Amino acid sequence: MGGKVVVTCAVTGGMTVPSQSKAIPVTPGEIIDDAVAAHEAGAAIIHIHVRDPQTGRPVADLDLFGEVLEGISARCDAVLQPTTGGGVGMSIEERAAVLERFRPEMATFNAGSFNFGIFPVGERDLELADWERDYVEGTRDYVFRNTFANMEYMAGRMRAAQAKPEIELYDVGHLYNLRHLVARDLLDTPLHLQFVLGVLGANDAELDQLVHMLRTAQRLLGDDFTWSAAGVGYPGEFHLVAASLMLGGQVRVGLEDNLRVRRDERAMSNVGLVDKAVELARLFDREPATPDEARKLLGLKGAGAVGF
Ligand code: KMH
Ligand code: ZN
């Protein structure tokens, strides 16, 4: 890989509402176009959620996932990584259904429960649709549920689909959950870790938290893992990009996590965020990896082995 860096773009997400930014892609067509453009800007992996095309509400609809996965794969060779995190109100079975239906190369695996609060969105000067206000306010009393039973179930579905889990870690305690799951041989190694920092309800996007979690992962898991950092919010997203570039990690950006390119500049699309990540990478002598270089680094099964 040399100094290459795997850039993941999280194009739309499930814990934002469309009124937060006109740039958030909603329809399958918008998600496909943004994903292809993000790939052309340097993203090797596209992290995918889907939304109701009319309202923009995060949904787990498999037909929408199919339309998006097929639409992107028809136009580029990016690694496609559907979410199993979904959004508020989705059962673990609904969240996992993408695995059996599409047998993706990768999918997210959330390594623990935690409060996931986006209710401050409702306290801003934003015109929200009724469902959006209910959705964000509802997170005042919402736990993103990933119990051990949920994780055992999800790990089994991942293995059955031969999908490489990207282990989403929001808090240092999630690393101890992960050690437990690995010790029971529920997850294959080498692992790919995603340190997701900045969610209200878990660790914030602070450099010492990233280093602490990385060092804890090395202590608990040895060195047998690859890792990436995903900062939620601004400037956390790019602080973690810069830190990860220096520490030899991979990076994730995208409108799922952050809506600003600069303090006073809102992102007009995912491309603006990918462009900034690539620009930062080049300042640290690192070039964006191609999808096939990402496949090699992460040990993925290849686009020919997926079910879409
Ligand atoms: N929305 C991110 C903070 C997933 O999709 O499974 C977390 C995430 C997890 O992307
Ligand atoms: Zn996600």
Image (tube, helix red, strand yellow):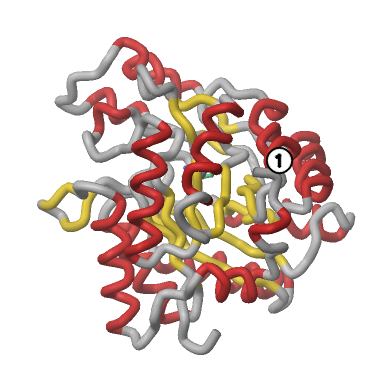
- Would residue 190 appear left or right of 79 to someone viewing this image? right
Residue for point 48% across, 72% down? 290
Horizontal and vertical percent position of residue 230:
44, 57
Residue for point 75% across, 35% down? 150
In front here: 31 or 265?
A: 31
Looking at the rendering, in which quadrant would you find the N terminus? Answer: bottom right
Which amino acid lies under the numbered mark 1 shown in the image of this protein?
Leu
**With respect to residue 97, does 282 lie above or below?**
below
Residue for point 71% across, 40% down? 99
**With respect to residue 130, does 31 lie above or below?**
below
Q: Which residue is situated farthest in the left direction here?
A: 264
Residue at mark 1: 99
- Would residue 266 appear left or right of 305 to someone viewing this image? left
Tell me the quarter of the picture where residue 184 sits. bottom right
In front here: 15 or 219?
A: 15
Tell me the quarter of the picture where residue 125 sits. top left
Number of callouts: 1
Neighbour tally class for label 1: few under 14, some 14-19, many 20 plus, Cα within 10 Å: many
Horizontal and vertical percent position of residue 238:
31, 63
Looking at the rendering, in which quadrant would you find the C terminus? Answer: top right
What secondary structure is found at the residue carrying circle 1?
Answer: helix
